[in-house]
Image: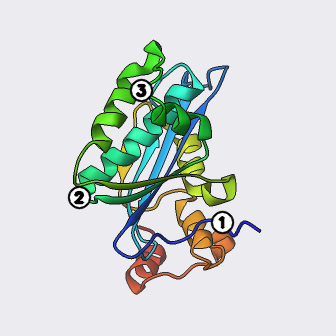
Amino acid sequence: MDMGWKLPKKGWVKVNVHGVYYQTPLTNGTRSGVGVVVRNEDGDIIVMVSGTLNLLNERVNDLWALLMGLRCCLYAGKHKVILETESGDAVREWQDWRWFINPSYSDVIESLVKRTDDERLELEVSVVTESSNHLARYLAIDGAVNRSVAVMFTRPFGRVRDLWHRDMGLGTTEFGFDLYTEEEYRKMQEGD
């Protein structure tokens, strides 16, 4: 039985990534979205990416999501990385780069290979189910709908907080089932 997202090993970060592609452009004109979430051994969010890349096929979006996940780790100074995606095809294509690289996205494969050649990087790559990747999926869909570029965030927004709480086994925050700091409560009362 799949229990959903699990904490990474001590001293490691877990990076969940997802790329979405729509055959028909959305109302904002975009066709793609990318979502990345990097969490530490306690499940705390270090950094997230939500946005669009305006790329024209599903495989490219999945590969760029993988690369963005690794970029976020480099940005955050994290080198022990568990990278999770639902796209087994993208992982296989990346791992089989010596035999064939599709010319239409060879640049992203070459960047992935170069990044993984970094001696500081300890990397484990896993293909996971949707239930282990809810937050990255949400970020990708939200990014496609609401952004024109890929944007990096360090604080929860939208449904991120609820999905994060569910991943951590803390229950829902929807419908007001959340905890607020005194400062947050004061601001709510004052109408800020």
Residue found at x 54% / y 56%: 158
Tell me the quarter of the picture where residue 154 sits: bottom left
Compared across the picture, whether 168 is left or right of 65 comes to: right
What is the three-letter code of the residue carrying label 3?
A: Arg
Binning the other alpha carbons within 10 Å of mark 1 as few (below 14), some (14 to 19) or many (20 upward) gives some
Binning the other alpha carbons within 10 Å of mark 2 as few (below 14), some (14 to 19) or many (20 upward) gives few
Q: Name the residue nearer the viewer: 171 or 77.
A: 77
Q: Please give the residue where the numbered disc 2 appears in the rendered image.
A: 77
Residue found at x 38% / y 54%: 123
Tell me the quarter of the picture where residue 150 sits: top left
Q: Please give the residue where the numbered disc 1 appears in the rendered image.
A: 4
Q: Nearer the viewer, mark 3 or mark 1?
A: 3
Element under disc 1: loop
Q: Name the residue nearer the viewer: 130 or 10.
A: 10
* Above or below: residue 77 compared with residue 108: below
Q: Please give the residue where the numbered disc 3 appears in the rendered image.
A: 98
Mark 1 and mark 2: Cα distance apart in space: 27 Å
Element under disc 2: loop
> Percent position (x, y) of residue 20?
59, 35
Q: Nearer the viewer, mark 3 or mark 2?
A: 3
> Percent position (x, y) of residue 25?
62, 21
Mark 3 and mark 2: Cα distance apart in space: 28 Å
Q: Can the viewer see residue 51?
A: no
